[in-house]
Image (cartoon, helix red, strand yellow):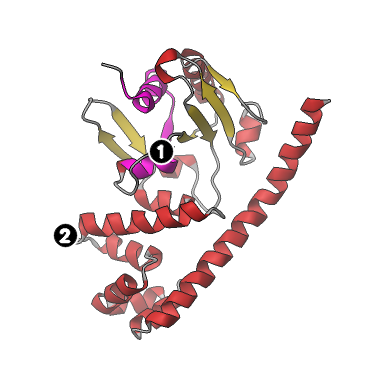
């Protein structure tokens, strides 16, 4: 039987004892918010020992860096992604993107403490970004990430709605992006919604049951996050352009 190439990539990283967390589309697949993703995105601890382990795994996968920057602790700590293409026959063509710093998301150590660990049907162990952390990481300038963010929150609500915990209420009130659902949650937990409205003002409109206002404020929230992401990446993209020019000389 030919093994799932994504699981092959992940098991190779684990065999090399790389400390990493799966994120991106593949993590969304595991959380039931997506059906398919071709690439594998991970966030890692970018210290010397872990980068040595990562290099060992990349060698086993016959992975080649396909863009600037090259793999280094400095590039990762600055917030860059390092992109690889795997050439091993079992995973030929698989793209692996590596990061260590994510905009608006905690340090790797904090992410590691909150991680979700699952066992696949094949018996593989996979460590994922927790669903709330994955939602935070999805607040980018890309259209597809906002669609996935909404699906992730709704998948979380479906999973926990029968036996919710207090932390679940807070997560839904702070991250739900479906106007009708948000109004329903605010109506069910009005005291907590009022408390959190200082952090998320649109909860005031949700408490009032004003779906039109909630929808407009959700659009404003998204627009601001997209602008924040563009501002974050602007200097990093300028660095990448300088690296490309230096390489082409």
Above or below, 190 against 112 in this view is below
What is the number of the mark on residue 182?
Answer: none
First reached walking from the N terminus: tag 2 or tag 1: 1
* Image quadrant occupied by the N terminus: top left
Q: Is residue 155 magenta?
A: no
Above or below, 25 against 65 in this view is below
Q: Position of residue 100 (x, y in %)?
A: 54, 37
In this picture, residue 8 sits left or right of residue 61:
left
- Please report the bounds of the magenta region as a residue range: 3-29
Q: Is residue 18 magenta?
A: yes
- Mark 2–mark 1 CB contact (< 8 Å): no
Q: Position of residue 48 (x, y in %)?
A: 56, 24
Residue drawn at x 43%, y 13% is: 89
Which quarter of the picture shows residue 192? bottom left
What is the number of the mark on residue 163?
Answer: 2
Residue drawn at x 52%, y 33% is: 97
* Residue farthest left in this picture: 162
């Amino acid at each position: 039987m030919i093994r799932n190439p994504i699981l092959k990539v992940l098991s190779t990283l684990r065999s090399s004892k790389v400390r990493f967390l799966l994120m991106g589309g593949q993590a969304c697949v595991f959380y039931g918010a997506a059906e398919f993703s071709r690439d594998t995105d991970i966030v890692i601890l970018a210290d010397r020992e872990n980068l040595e382990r990562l290099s060992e795994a990349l060698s086993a996968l016959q992975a080649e860096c396909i863009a600037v920057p090259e793999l280094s602790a400095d590039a990762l700590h600055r917030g860059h992604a390092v992109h690889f293409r795997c050439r091993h026959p079992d995973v030929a063509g698989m793209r692996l993107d590596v990061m260590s710093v994510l905009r608006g998301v905690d340090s790797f150590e904090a992410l590691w403490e909150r991680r979700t660990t699952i066992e696949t049907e094949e018996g593989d162990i996979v460590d994922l970004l927790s669903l709330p952390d994955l939602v935070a990481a999805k607040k980018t300038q890309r259209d597809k990430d906002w669609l996935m963010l909404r699906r992730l929150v709704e998948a979380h609500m479906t999973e926990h709605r029968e036996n919710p915990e207090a932390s679940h209420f807070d997560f839904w009130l702070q991250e739900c992006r479906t106007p009708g659902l948000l109004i329903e949650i605010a109506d069910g937990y009005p005291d907590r919604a009022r408390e959190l409205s200082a952090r998320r003002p649109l909860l005031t409109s949700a408490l009032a049951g004003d779906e039109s206002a909630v929808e407009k404020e959700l659009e404003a929230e998204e627009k601001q996050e997209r602008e924040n992401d563009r501002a974050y990446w602007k200097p990093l993209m300028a660095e990448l352009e300088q690296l490309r020019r230096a390489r082409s000389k």
